[in-house]
Image: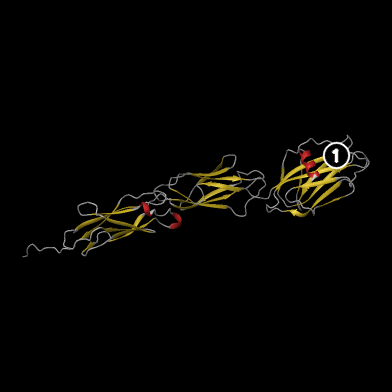
């Protein structure tokens, strides 16, 4: 309670001993099993540590010649990884060690701001107060977003993909962070950054004739200035789709001659592999039937998911030859991203009346 408030007050105040010969703080070192970090005297400088911390070592100096009074000297540490089971020990001369009962974990669970409050007193009652602050960061930067967005479908040609990064504790290393793009075509690219939080990959614009269509994967491996990286790169996907749907088959097939009456015609559509295209927008697709004179045949269009258009003439087709002739199915197809096909024409012959023999020789 009271020590916390005292520490916070001194974190923003000028350090000064009680008297000219009051005990002095020599150093504060944050230590792991194989590394130490000396905390700066400048409290505004937020130094950062990433290794699992086992203890903090504090070296003091008695300037009165009477020795340090360790019974009256206080060390308080605050931060996410501090517990009531932490302990302190001293060498009886000039060093205090603050020992974490559970070493500060480097799995992200103990990341955050830490402070060390020290009130040191000598054997004649002179004292000094000091505060040191540091950050603990064992977490790799996040990828906040990508352009194109993860899971999106696009049909406009692009010449760049990018990722926005964030490190809540330290700074992103924009030069060691990487971004790559893989997909149906080979891509030669150059990585750049905006100097703040975005890394991008620039390349020649993707072709819009269907040759570059397909599923693409953006791989992002962010790194901060402490060399924290994720266990695996973050991956994001998008679909580049510039090609409209096409016809797989029709009934009747193109060029067919029908000698018996028909009650419907149909077209089966495709937009390519489901995982690399936007998919057919069946409600936007259409099938008309044109009579031999070019007029529209009246009737009912039925759309059957996922890919079939069926047209049924409103009246039965005559079998006395009056309706005979060449009929044309007129199909337009559209996908979910808005790619629209040109008009597709499929013709067949309806011939129910046998040819009349005009003469013989």
Front residue of 281 and 241: 281
Lateral position of residue 55 relative to residue 123, left or right = left
Left or right: 297 as drawn, with respect to 127: left
Q: How many marks?
A: 1
Q: Is residue 351 above or below residue 76?
A: below
The x and y percentages for residue 79 are 74, 48
- Residue 167, horizontal then vertical, whole percent: 63, 45
The residue lying at 21 percent from left, 57 percent from top is 326
Comparing 301 with 22, the one in front is: 301
Q: Report helix, strand or loop for mark 1.
A: strand
Quadrant of the rendering where the C terminus is positioned: bottom left
Render colour scheme: secondary structure
Residue 131 occupies which quadrant of the picture?
A: top right
Query: Residue 350 sits in which quadrant?
Result: bottom left
Residue at numbered disc 1:
128
Outermost residue, left direction?
361
Q: Which sits in the foreground, 24 or 13? A: 13
Percent of width and height locating residue 91? 88, 49
Q: Dot 1 surroundings within 10 Å: few (below 14), some, or many (20 or more)? A: many
Residue 257 drawn at (x, y percent): 22, 62
Of 297 and 109, nearer the camera is 297
């Amino acid at each position: 309670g009271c020590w916390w408030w005292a520490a916070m007050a001194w974190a923003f105040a000028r350090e000064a001993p009680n008297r000219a010969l009051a005990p002095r703080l020599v150093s504060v070192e944050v230590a792991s099993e194989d590394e130490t970090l000396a905390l700066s005297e400048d409290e505004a400088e937020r130094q950062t540590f990433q290794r699992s911390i086992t203890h903090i070592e504090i070296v003091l100096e008695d300037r009165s010649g009477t020795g340090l009074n360790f019974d009256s000297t206080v060390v308080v540490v605050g931060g996410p990884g501090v517990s009531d089971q932490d302990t302190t020990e001293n060498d009886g001369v000039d060093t205090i060690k603050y020992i974490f009962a559970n070493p500060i974990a480097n799995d992200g669970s103990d990341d955050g701001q830490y402070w060390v409050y020290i009130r040191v007193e000598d054997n004649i009652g002179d004292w000094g107060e000091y505060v040191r602050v540091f950050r603990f960061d064992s977490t790799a930067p996040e990828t906040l977003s990508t352009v194109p967005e993860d899971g999106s479908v696009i049909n406009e040609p692009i010449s760049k993909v990018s990722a926005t990064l964030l490190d809540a504790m330290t700074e992103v290393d924009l030069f060691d962070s990487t971004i790559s793009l893989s997909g149906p075509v080979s891509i030669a690219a150059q990585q750049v950054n905006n100097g703040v939080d975005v890394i991008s990959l620039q390349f020649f614009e993707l072709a819009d004739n269907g040759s570059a269509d397909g599923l693409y994967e953006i791989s992002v491996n962010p790194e901060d200035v402490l060399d924290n990286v994720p266990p695996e790169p973050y991956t994001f996907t998008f679909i580049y789709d510039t090609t409209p749907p096409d016809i797989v088959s029709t009934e009747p097939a193109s060029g067919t001659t029908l000698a018996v009456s028909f009650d419907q015609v149909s077209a089966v559509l495709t937009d390519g592999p489901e995982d690399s295209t936007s998919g057919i927008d069946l409600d936007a697709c259409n099938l008309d039937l044109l009579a031999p004179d070019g007029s529209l045949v009246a009737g009912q269009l039925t759309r059957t998911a996922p890919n079939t258009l069926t047209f049924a003439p409103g009246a039965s087709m005559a079998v006395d030859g009056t309706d005979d002739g060449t009929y044309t199915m007129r199909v337009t197809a559209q996908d979910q991203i808005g790619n629209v096909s040109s008009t597709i024409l499929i013709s067949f012959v309806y011939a129910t009346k046998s040819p009349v023999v005009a003469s013989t020789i």
